[in-house]
Image (cartoon, rainbow, N blue to C red):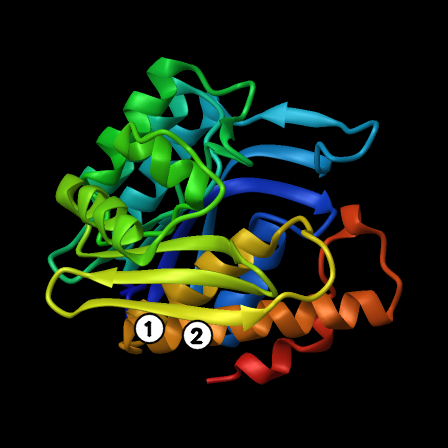
Amino acid sequence: MNNHNHQKKIALINDFTGFGRCSIAVQLPIISMMKVQCCPLPTSIFSNHTGYEHFFYTDYTDNMDAYMQEWKRLDLQFKGICTGFLGSAKQIQIVSDFIRQFKENDSIVIIDPVMGDYGKPYPTYTDEMCKKIVELVRYADIVVPNVTEACVLTDTPYKERWTTRELIVLAEKISAIGPEKVVITGIPQKTYVSNFCYEKEKGYEMIRTHKVGNSRSGTGDIFSAIVAADAVNGVEFTASVRKASKFIQKCIQKSVEMDLPLTDGVCFEELLYTLRA
Protein backbone atom coordinates (compact mmCIF):
# COMPACT_ATOMS: atom_id res chain seq x y z
CA MET A 1 0.00 0.00 0.00
CA ASN A 2 1.27 3.50 -0.87
CA ASN A 3 2.54 5.63 1.99
CA HIS A 4 1.84 9.30 1.34
CA ASN A 5 3.54 10.54 4.50
CA HIS A 6 7.28 10.52 3.79
CA GLN A 7 7.31 14.31 3.39
CA LYS A 8 6.23 16.91 5.95
CA LYS A 9 2.79 18.32 5.16
CA ILE A 10 0.64 21.22 6.32
CA ALA A 11 -3.13 21.14 5.94
CA LEU A 12 -4.10 24.70 5.04
CA ILE A 13 -7.75 25.60 5.68
CA ASN A 14 -8.61 28.96 4.16
CA ASP A 15 -10.43 30.55 1.22
CA PHE A 16 -8.99 30.56 -2.28
CA THR A 17 -8.78 33.92 -4.04
CA GLY A 18 -7.74 34.06 -7.68
CA PHE A 19 -6.60 37.69 -7.72
CA GLY A 20 -5.54 40.10 -4.98
CA ARG A 21 -2.78 38.09 -3.31
CA CYS A 22 -4.31 36.72 -0.14
CA SER A 23 -5.27 33.46 1.61
CA ILE A 24 -4.31 30.17 -0.07
CA ALA A 25 -2.94 31.94 -3.17
CA VAL A 26 -0.05 33.42 -1.16
CA GLN A 27 0.28 30.78 1.56
CA LEU A 28 0.71 27.78 -0.72
CA PRO A 29 3.82 29.03 -2.61
CA ILE A 30 5.40 30.31 0.61
CA ILE A 31 4.94 27.01 2.47
CA SER A 32 6.18 25.10 -0.59
CA MET A 33 9.29 27.32 -0.89
CA MET A 34 10.05 26.45 2.74
CA LYS A 35 10.17 22.74 1.80
CA VAL A 36 6.85 21.68 3.31
CA GLN A 37 4.09 20.14 1.19
CA CYS A 38 1.01 22.37 1.37
CA CYS A 39 -2.39 20.64 1.15
CA PRO A 40 -5.19 23.22 0.84
CA LEU A 41 -8.75 22.67 2.00
CA PRO A 42 -10.79 25.60 0.59
CA THR A 43 -13.60 27.15 2.61
CA SER A 44 -14.79 29.30 -0.30
CA ILE A 45 -13.62 30.41 -3.73
CA PHE A 46 -13.35 34.04 -4.84
CA SER A 47 -12.44 35.42 -8.26
CA ASN A 48 -10.79 38.33 -6.40
CA HIS A 49 -11.05 39.41 -2.77
CA THR A 50 -13.86 41.49 -1.32
CA GLY A 51 -11.81 44.69 -1.27
CA TYR A 52 -12.66 45.11 -4.94
CA GLU A 53 -15.97 46.60 -6.09
CA HIS A 54 -17.11 43.37 -7.78
CA PHE A 55 -16.24 39.71 -7.19
CA PHE A 56 -17.49 36.18 -7.89
CA TYR A 57 -17.91 33.93 -4.87
CA THR A 58 -18.77 30.30 -4.18
CA ASP A 59 -19.24 28.89 -0.68
CA TYR A 60 -17.47 25.54 -0.27
CA THR A 61 -18.89 24.65 3.16
CA ASP A 62 -21.13 21.80 1.99
CA ASN A 63 -18.20 20.12 0.22
CA MET A 64 -15.67 20.34 3.02
CA ASP A 65 -16.62 17.18 4.90
CA ALA A 66 -16.54 14.94 1.79
CA TYR A 67 -13.18 16.53 0.87
CA MET A 68 -11.84 15.69 4.35
CA GLN A 69 -13.04 12.10 4.16
CA GLU A 70 -11.05 11.51 0.96
CA TRP A 71 -7.95 12.61 2.84
CA LYS A 72 -8.89 10.12 5.58
CA ARG A 73 -9.13 7.34 2.98
CA LEU A 74 -5.61 8.23 1.83
CA ASP A 75 -4.43 8.09 5.47
CA LEU A 76 -2.82 11.52 5.17
CA GLN A 77 -0.89 12.71 8.21
CA PHE A 78 -0.07 16.35 8.81
CA LYS A 79 2.82 17.85 10.75
CA GLY A 80 0.95 21.14 10.72
CA ILE A 81 -2.65 22.33 10.53
CA CYS A 82 -3.06 26.02 9.69
CA THR A 83 -6.37 27.88 9.59
CA GLY A 84 -7.37 31.29 8.21
CA PHE A 85 -10.63 33.17 7.66
CA LEU A 86 -13.75 31.13 8.46
CA GLY A 87 -17.04 32.49 7.19
CA SER A 88 -19.68 30.82 9.35
CA ALA A 89 -20.31 28.95 12.60
CA LYS A 90 -20.67 25.76 10.55
CA GLN A 91 -17.21 26.22 9.02
CA ILE A 92 -15.68 26.76 12.45
CA GLN A 93 -17.30 23.51 13.60
CA ILE A 94 -15.97 21.66 10.52
CA VAL A 95 -12.45 22.91 11.27
CA SER A 96 -12.77 21.74 14.89
CA ASP A 97 -13.80 18.32 13.56
CA PHE A 98 -10.84 18.33 11.16
CA ILE A 99 -8.37 18.99 13.97
CA ARG A 100 -9.86 16.21 16.11
CA GLN A 101 -9.66 13.75 13.20
CA PHE A 102 -6.21 14.63 11.84
CA LYS A 103 -4.10 15.98 14.69
CA GLU A 104 -1.28 13.59 15.61
CA ASN A 105 0.77 13.72 18.81
CA ASP A 106 3.50 15.67 17.00
CA SER A 107 1.20 17.86 14.88
CA ILE A 108 1.36 21.63 15.38
CA VAL A 109 -1.89 23.58 15.06
CA ILE A 110 -1.54 27.22 13.98
CA ILE A 111 -4.71 29.29 14.17
CA ASP A 112 -5.11 32.76 12.74
CA PRO A 113 -8.40 33.88 14.36
CA VAL A 114 -9.42 36.21 11.53
CA MET A 115 -12.32 38.09 13.13
CA GLY A 116 -11.73 41.81 12.72
CA ASP A 117 -9.43 44.80 12.62
CA TYR A 118 -9.19 48.43 13.72
CA GLY A 119 -11.07 47.73 16.95
CA LYS A 120 -14.15 46.02 15.53
CA PRO A 121 -15.15 42.50 14.45
CA TYR A 122 -15.97 42.12 10.76
CA PRO A 123 -19.68 42.76 9.99
CA THR A 124 -20.18 39.07 9.12
CA TYR A 125 -18.90 37.93 12.53
CA THR A 126 -21.69 37.24 15.01
CA ASP A 127 -21.33 36.79 18.77
CA GLU A 128 -21.87 33.05 18.23
CA MET A 129 -18.98 32.90 15.74
CA CYS A 130 -16.65 34.84 18.06
CA LYS A 131 -17.42 32.37 20.86
CA LYS A 132 -16.79 29.42 18.54
CA ILE A 133 -13.42 30.87 17.53
CA VAL A 134 -12.48 30.97 21.22
CA GLU A 135 -13.38 27.27 21.41
CA LEU A 136 -11.30 26.60 18.28
CA VAL A 137 -8.28 28.38 19.81
CA ARG A 138 -8.30 25.73 22.57
CA TYR A 139 -6.84 23.33 19.98
CA ALA A 140 -4.03 25.70 18.95
CA ASP A 141 -0.34 25.32 19.71
CA ILE A 142 0.32 28.72 18.12
CA VAL A 143 -2.20 31.54 17.69
CA VAL A 144 -1.54 34.75 15.71
CA PRO A 145 -4.24 37.37 16.44
CA ASN A 146 -3.98 41.04 15.66
CA VAL A 147 -4.76 43.47 18.51
CA THR A 148 -8.48 43.58 17.72
CA GLU A 149 -8.72 39.79 17.66
CA ALA A 150 -6.71 39.48 20.87
CA CYS A 151 -9.27 41.76 22.53
CA VAL A 152 -12.20 39.72 21.17
CA LEU A 153 -10.63 36.45 22.34
CA THR A 154 -10.17 37.78 25.88
CA ASP A 155 -13.24 40.04 26.13
CA THR A 156 -10.93 43.02 26.63
CA PRO A 157 -11.89 46.58 25.62
CA TYR A 158 -9.98 47.71 22.54
CA LYS A 159 -7.69 50.73 22.57
CA GLU A 160 -5.02 52.21 20.32
CA ARG A 161 -2.01 52.18 22.64
CA TRP A 162 -0.74 49.39 24.88
CA THR A 163 2.02 49.14 27.46
CA THR A 164 4.26 46.10 27.55
CA ARG A 165 2.64 45.02 30.82
CA GLU A 166 -0.84 45.22 29.26
CA LEU A 167 0.30 43.13 26.29
CA ILE A 168 1.74 40.52 28.65
CA VAL A 169 -1.62 40.26 30.43
CA LEU A 170 -3.44 40.03 27.07
CA ALA A 171 -1.11 37.29 25.81
CA GLU A 172 -1.34 35.37 29.10
CA LYS A 173 -5.13 35.39 28.86
CA ILE A 174 -4.97 34.01 25.32
CA SER A 175 -2.42 31.38 26.30
CA ALA A 176 -4.68 30.33 29.18
CA ILE A 177 -7.29 29.33 26.56
CA GLY A 178 -4.88 26.68 25.25
CA PRO A 179 -1.96 27.71 23.01
CA GLU A 180 1.62 27.54 24.26
CA LYS A 181 2.71 30.32 21.91
CA VAL A 182 1.01 33.61 21.09
CA VAL A 183 2.03 36.43 18.80
CA ILE A 184 -0.09 39.59 18.82
CA THR A 185 0.55 41.14 15.43
CA GLY A 186 0.51 44.57 13.85
CA ILE A 187 0.90 46.73 16.96
CA PRO A 188 1.49 50.35 15.88
CA GLN A 189 4.31 52.04 17.81
CA LYS A 190 5.21 55.43 16.30
CA THR A 191 7.46 54.67 13.30
CA TYR A 192 7.41 50.92 13.99
CA VAL A 193 5.03 48.02 13.55
CA SER A 194 5.53 45.53 16.37
CA ASN A 195 4.71 41.89 16.99
CA PHE A 196 4.50 40.77 20.60
CA CYS A 197 5.68 37.17 21.11
CA TYR A 198 4.75 35.20 24.22
CA GLU A 199 5.69 31.64 25.19
CA LYS A 200 4.51 29.96 28.38
CA GLU A 201 7.93 28.54 29.16
CA LYS A 202 10.14 31.41 27.92
CA GLY A 203 8.32 34.68 28.53
CA TYR A 204 7.94 37.47 25.97
CA GLU A 205 9.77 39.48 23.32
CA MET A 206 8.72 42.53 21.33
CA ILE A 207 9.84 42.38 17.70
CA ARG A 208 9.82 45.75 15.91
CA THR A 209 10.20 46.60 12.24
CA HIS A 210 10.17 50.05 10.66
CA LYS A 211 6.80 50.88 9.11
CA VAL A 212 6.85 51.26 5.33
CA GLY A 213 3.98 52.04 2.99
CA ASN A 214 0.36 51.30 3.85
CA SER A 215 -1.56 48.22 4.96
CA ARG A 216 -2.11 45.70 2.16
CA SER A 217 -4.20 42.57 1.68
CA GLY A 218 -2.60 39.21 2.38
CA THR A 219 0.14 40.27 4.81
CA GLY A 220 -1.50 38.34 7.66
CA ASP A 221 -1.69 35.25 5.46
CA ILE A 222 2.00 35.58 4.59
CA PHE A 223 2.83 35.93 8.27
CA SER A 224 0.91 32.81 9.37
CA ALA A 225 2.31 30.76 6.45
CA ILE A 226 5.91 31.52 7.43
CA VAL A 227 5.24 30.83 11.11
CA ALA A 228 3.48 27.55 10.24
CA ALA A 229 6.21 26.27 7.91
CA ASP A 230 8.93 27.23 10.37
CA ALA A 231 7.08 25.53 13.21
CA VAL A 232 7.00 22.15 11.44
CA ASN A 233 10.64 22.68 10.42
CA GLY A 234 11.63 23.16 14.06
CA VAL A 235 12.63 26.83 13.81
CA GLU A 236 12.64 28.76 17.08
CA PHE A 237 9.43 30.80 17.52
CA THR A 238 10.78 34.34 17.89
CA ALA A 239 13.28 33.77 15.07
CA SER A 240 10.35 32.77 12.86
CA VAL A 241 8.33 35.86 13.79
CA ARG A 242 11.36 38.05 13.09
CA LYS A 243 11.77 36.40 9.67
CA ALA A 244 8.08 36.88 8.82
CA SER A 245 8.11 40.53 9.93
CA LYS A 246 11.19 41.35 7.88
CA PHE A 247 9.91 39.51 4.82
CA ILE A 248 6.59 41.39 4.87
CA GLN A 249 8.39 44.72 5.31
CA LYS A 250 10.54 44.00 2.23
CA CYS A 251 7.51 42.89 0.22
CA ILE A 252 5.60 46.09 1.05
CA GLN A 253 8.64 48.20 0.13
CA LYS A 254 8.94 46.38 -3.20
CA SER A 255 5.23 46.86 -3.88
CA VAL A 256 5.58 50.60 -3.27
CA GLU A 257 8.55 50.74 -5.66
CA MET A 258 6.48 48.93 -8.32
CA ASP A 259 3.49 51.25 -7.73
CA LEU A 260 1.06 48.40 -7.15
CA PRO A 261 -2.51 49.29 -6.07
CA LEU A 262 -3.12 48.58 -2.38
CA THR A 263 -5.91 46.12 -3.21
CA ASP A 264 -3.47 44.01 -5.25
CA GLY A 265 -1.55 43.03 -2.12
CA VAL A 266 2.22 42.61 -1.91
CA CYS A 267 4.46 41.34 -4.72
CA PHE A 268 5.94 38.57 -2.61
CA GLU A 269 6.89 36.72 -5.80
CA GLU A 270 9.82 39.13 -6.25
CA LEU A 271 11.30 38.04 -2.89
CA LEU A 272 10.03 34.50 -2.49
CA TYR A 273 13.47 33.03 -3.17
CA THR A 274 14.76 34.61 0.09
CA LEU A 275 12.64 32.13 2.08
CA ARG A 276 14.31 29.08 0.53
CA ALA A 277 15.16 26.70 3.36
* Residue 243 position in % (x across, y down): 47, 76
Vertically, is 177 above or below 179?
Answer: above
Question: In this image, 124 relative to 268: left or right?
Answer: left
Vertically, is 14 above or below 116?
Answer: below
Mark 1–mark 2 Cα distance, whole angstroms, equals 6 Å
Q: Which kind of residue does numbered mark 2 sit on?
A: Arg
* Front-lying residue, 195 or 76: 195
Q: Report the number of numbered marks.
A: 2
* Residue 267 position in % (x across, y down): 74, 65
* Residue 188 position in % (x across, y down): 53, 54
Question: In this image, 29 relative to 234: left or right?
Answer: right
Q: Are marks 1 and 2 in contact (CB under 8 Å)?
A: yes
Label of residue 242 in the image? 2
Q: Secondary structure at mark 2?
A: helix
Q: What residue lies at 22% left-to-right and 30% top-to-bottom?
A: 135
Question: In this image, 260 relative to 180: left or right?
Answer: right
Q: What residue lies at 72% left-to-right and 45% top-to-bottom?
A: 18
Q: Quadrant of the N terminus?
A: bottom left
The picture quadrant where one finds residue 89 is top left
Q: Which residue has dot 1 on it?
A: 238
Label of residue 70 in the image? none
Q: Secondary structure at mark 1?
A: helix
Residue positioned most to the right = 259
Vertically, is 228 above or below 72?
Answer: below
* Front-lying residue, 272 or 32: 272
Question: In this image, 122 relative to 226: left or right?
Answer: right
* Residue 40 position in % (x across, y down): 48, 49
* Front-lying residue, 105 or 256: 256
The picture quadrant where one finds residue 2 is bottom left
Q: Which kind of residue does numbered mark 1 sit on?
A: Thr
